Structure formats: C-alpha cells, structure tokens
Image: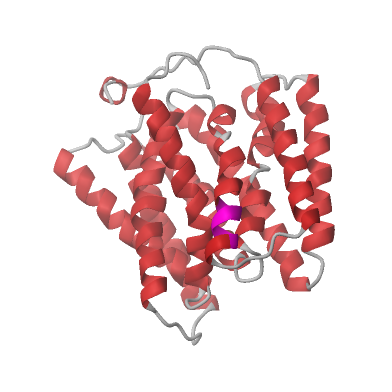
Amino acid sequence: MPSGLGFRHYAAYVMLCAIWGSTWMAIRVVVSEVPPLWAAAVRFAIAGFIVAAVVLAQRVPLPRNREEWKHLLILSLTMMAIPFGLVFWAEQHVTSAMTAVLWTSSPLLISSLTPFMTGKKVPRPAIVAMVVAAGGIGVLFHSQLTATTKSLVGGVAILLAVTSSGWSALYSKKHILGVPPMVTTGVQLAVGTVVLGAASLLFEDGQGLRWSAQATAAMIFLAVFGSAVAFATYYWLLRKMHPYQLSTISLIVPLVAIAEGALLLQEPIPPMMLIASIVVLLGVGMVLRAQSDEPIELKLKPEAASD
C-alpha cells in the first residue's frame, strides 16, 4: 500500500475486500433463479436509486461539459454493462470460487495495458511474473473449465470481463478523477441498467424467474453493498492509489470467495484448482511488487479535491 494513507483508507480497502469477496457467491445464488442479464439490470437499478438519492440530498455537482459525459458513458459500458453482463451469464456455468480466481488476472491485464495507455514501462520482473500467472490460468482452464462447452465459454467470458474492467480502471484514472465518486457511480449504474435491461428484453424474453427469499437477500446485498457502496468507495480510493495498487484487492477476494463457496454453497475445491490458484496469486503478487512507487499527482477540480 502506498504511503500517505490514513486509517479510513485502510478501512475502506478492507471493506472492499470483504464485500467483493462475497459478491461472487451472491451472484451465483441470484442467477440460479433469475435470468442473468435481468438480474444484473435489477442490481444496478436498485443501486442507482440509492446513489441518486444521495447525490440529490447532498447536492453533489454533476459533470459540466460534454467531454466528461462522454468519458462517463464509455466507462458505463466498459466498467459496468459489459463486464457484469458477462460475469452474471458466466456464473450459471462457472463456480463462484473459480470466477473469483480468474478475476485475479485483473492486475496482470492492468500491468499489460499500462505502457500503452500511460506510457510507463512495466519492469522486467513483472513481465516474468505475468508469464507465470498466465500459466496458472491456463492450468485452471484445462483442469476445471474444459469439461463442458458452456464452462469453457463461461471462463472466456470472465476473462473478457476482466479485460474490459482493467482497461476501464486505467481510463478512469486518466479521464474522470475530477468528477465526484458518487456521480461517477450513479451515471454508470443508470447506463448499466438501461443497457442490460434492453439486452434482457432482447435475449431473455420468455425465460422464467423466481425470486425466493434467498435470491432476494442476495440481490439486496449486491445492489446496496456490492454496487452503491463498493463502487463509490472504489472511485474514492482510486484518487489516492495507483490502479494496479488498488487491484491488489484481487489477491484477497478469491480467498473469501473460495471459503464462502465451500462453506455455504458446498462448492468443491479440487487439489489442482488450489495449486493453480496459488500459482496465479503468486504471479499477481510478483507483478504488484515489481511496480514502481512513484507518487501520485492528481489535478482535481476544487469541488472534487475537497472530498
């Protein structure tokens, strides 16, 4: 973790680990009863109403120019609609633990994209670590996701979601740090709701759904904590931390997801999955350690700098 962080930053970091470590299990519970695209749209709609209420109550300023709205629209698609639509669909065929482990490739993707999007070089040890981690992901695919076509496609969908999300982290770092975090989150949730709701009407029309008490509770958790609280916190922390530093959450999330999946959903943990997961986590850890400790210099608008 970088220097200059206070207790509230560490507390927010730990809270994100706990919340996002639990979202994979909650998604698995919801999509077992509700069409995935519709479930994702409902999640974003509930969270969007919560965020909008906060923005209106606190009179948080909205973006003032077309350029900021353009950046927010791009992020709404690449950070929310596309990756979460893919993940919700994939978790019909891939366990929550496997989804969380595959999501650990996020720091690898961000490190790979960093030279192209920021002009900064990636240290050679990080490149070696990426190769090691990629080998671990390959083993996971071969041992756990090739049993059926749907599980294989589900694994690919998750990696595509990771790529979209990783690109968005770098893009948001460059373009929207002048926009208040609650506004950034609210706009993305609103656009995500519309896009995924429309996609559900097109592709899931006629599919049955059943909102049991368990699915309803999981959805409330996803909407309130997994979306409204978590993403606002994420963008707040992103102002203080480099994207690859904040992505270290990916090292902790799988541990939470694997434990909860095994204890609450009785998901199996094959030895090969455990070994490959450790290889992936070690590779990600090596990438993060290899990054430079350059200070973060942000030029924020006056109203954003006071947050």
Residue at image position (56%, 27%) is 245
- Where does residue 129 sit, x and y in percent of width and height? 79, 30
Residue at image position (72%, 33%) is 112
- Where does residue 202 sit, x and y in percent of width and height? 51, 76
Between 201 and 158, which is closer to the camera in this rendering? 158
Q: Is residue 182 above or below residue 307?
A: below
Q: Is residue 133 above or below residue 263?
A: above
Region rendered in magenta: 257-262
- Where does residue 249 sit, x and y in percent of width and height? 55, 37
Residue 126 image-quadrant placement? top right
Residue 165 image-quadrant placement? top right
Q: How many numbered circles does the render carry?
A: 0
Q: Is residue 164 above or below residue 223?
A: above
Q: Is residue 109 left or right of residue 215?
A: right
Q: Main secondary structure of the magenta part?
A: helix
Residue at image position (43%, 18%) is 298
**Would you say residue 47 sits in the magenta stretch?**
no
